[in-house]
Image (tube, coloured by chain):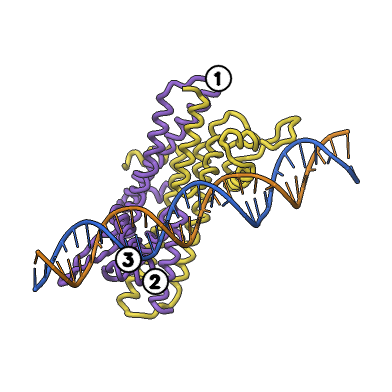
Chain colours: A yellow, B purple, C blue, D orange
Amino acid sequence: MKLQEAKMEFVQSWGSIGSSWGIPRSMAQIHALLLASNEALSTEDVMDSIKISRGNVNINMRELINWNLVAKQNKLGERKEFFSANHDIMAMAQNIVQERKKRELQPVLDLLEKLKSDKIQGNKEEVEHFQTLMTELEDFIKQLDQLSEIWLKLKDNFFFKKIIKTVS
Amino acid sequence: MKLQEAKMEFVQSWGSIGSSWGIPRSMAQIHALLLASNEALSTEDVMDSIKISRGNVNINMRELINWNLVAKQNKLGERKEFFSANHDIMAMAQNIVQERKKRELQPVLDLLEKLKSDKIQGNKEEVEHFQTLMTELEDFIKQLDQLSEIWLKLKDNFFFKKIIKTVS
DNA sequence: TAGAACTTTCAAAAATAATTGAAAGTTTAT
DNA sequence: ATAAACTTTCAATTATTTTTGAAAGTTCTA
């Protein structure tokens, strides 16, 4: 199998995976292409490789930059902009988690906060049931947060890793 | 604020949150409704509460049952089926994680496996770069797996919790 | 300051995903 | 066996999301 084919298969699959996690197919594909590429690519390189429009590359590249997954590069003597992925996979994952936490966990917390603080009127038992639910959901989300902290430690703390291994 | 309003606000929000995580809005809404409800509900109860069609309720309810988030119930003397959510939030989260792992992480692992095992032809340096990427992604996914194990422990092992607290 | 090289924007089009609803299927009671 | 009560299915419709591409905007060079 030629490298080019392998790369393209990877790009395709990463695209569909992203898609099922709520990340636009093109964004995931661009990311995969840059990850798999040794050197920085221009907008046109990307357009040609994955056959998508200029606008699409532009918009999704911006998003990847926002997520800190990709950075702009300049090549000496070239006017065009080039792009390269952050090749540290663990840092990459951290950024994705961070970003989704910010975008999608925060709204839940806000909602729960609001519904917990409001004085709710109704049948006592039912109100209690509802409020218990709100509290439990909040606890759960806090656990998720804690878990991502643990992961950070796990990632680069040898000592910590050992302890977990021992206890598990 | 009346309990009914609070519930409905929760149902709405849970719907949009689900939506942004790649879960159909109606499925998330039905789940929220059942979570917030003291007692089991019938298909018609759900149709009326969130104003969606019978078919929609049926299909999404089946999916919720597949995910082990909801169970069928029978009421004495009633012919209809009733549905109730699993009210243990942590178990619920576990099921969701499990389900997504199965559906979306497995395909990635299969892909990486395949691309790692194939003999890839091309410029040596580039091939190496590509293969390193594949290996790193695999490691990363394995870490995710490990993390979900740790979470299980964290959930119900007091001793473990303590240790983590100490080391963190 | 003109114009070439390049980037950004965004309304419209295309692709994808979710929902409807009525008909077909099933089960239960008499 | 029939009919009523209920559930399931799925082709067609509707809603949502993504992508396109051409025009507008920007920056650089001479």
**Do labels 2 and 3 touch, CB within 8 Å?**
no
Q: Check disc 2 and report its element: helix, strand or loop.
A: helix
Taking depth in this image into account, of A94 and A107 the one nearest to the observer is A107
Pointer 1 local density, CA inside 10 Å: few below 14, some 14–19, many at least 20 = few
Residue A48 in which image quadrant: top right
Question: Residue A155 — which label?
Answer: none
User: Which residue is rendered at x = 57% and y = 30% of the image?
Assistant: A37
Residue B72 in which image quadrant: bottom left
Q: Is residue A49 above or below residue A115?
A: above
Q: Is residue A146 visible?
A: yes
Identified by mark 1, the residue type is Asn
Subunit of label 3: B
Pick whichever of labels 2 and 3 is earlier in the sequence.
2
- The picture places residue A115, in percent across and down from the top left corner, at 44, 71
The residue beneath circle 3 is B34
The residue beneath circle 2 is B7
Q: CA distance from mark 2 to mark 3?
A: 10 Å
Subunit of label 1: B
Q: Check disc 1 and report its element: helix, strand or loop.
A: loop
- The picture places residue A143, in percent across and down from the top left corner, at 40, 55
- The picture places residue A8, in percent across and down from the top left corner, at 51, 31
Taking depth in this image into account, of A126 and A135 the one nearest to the observer is A126
Task: Evaluate whether label 1 is on the same chain as label 3.
Answer: yes
* Horizontal relation, residue A22 to residue B55: left or right: right
The residue beneath circle 1 is B123
Identified by mark 2, the residue type is Lys
Q: How many marks?
A: 3
Q: CA distance from mark 1 to mark 3?
A: 57 Å
Pick whichever of labels 1 and 3 is earlier in the sequence.
3
* Horizontal relation, residue B10 to residue A61: left or right: left
Subunit of label 2: B
Task: Evaluate whether label 2 is on the same chain as label 3.
Answer: yes
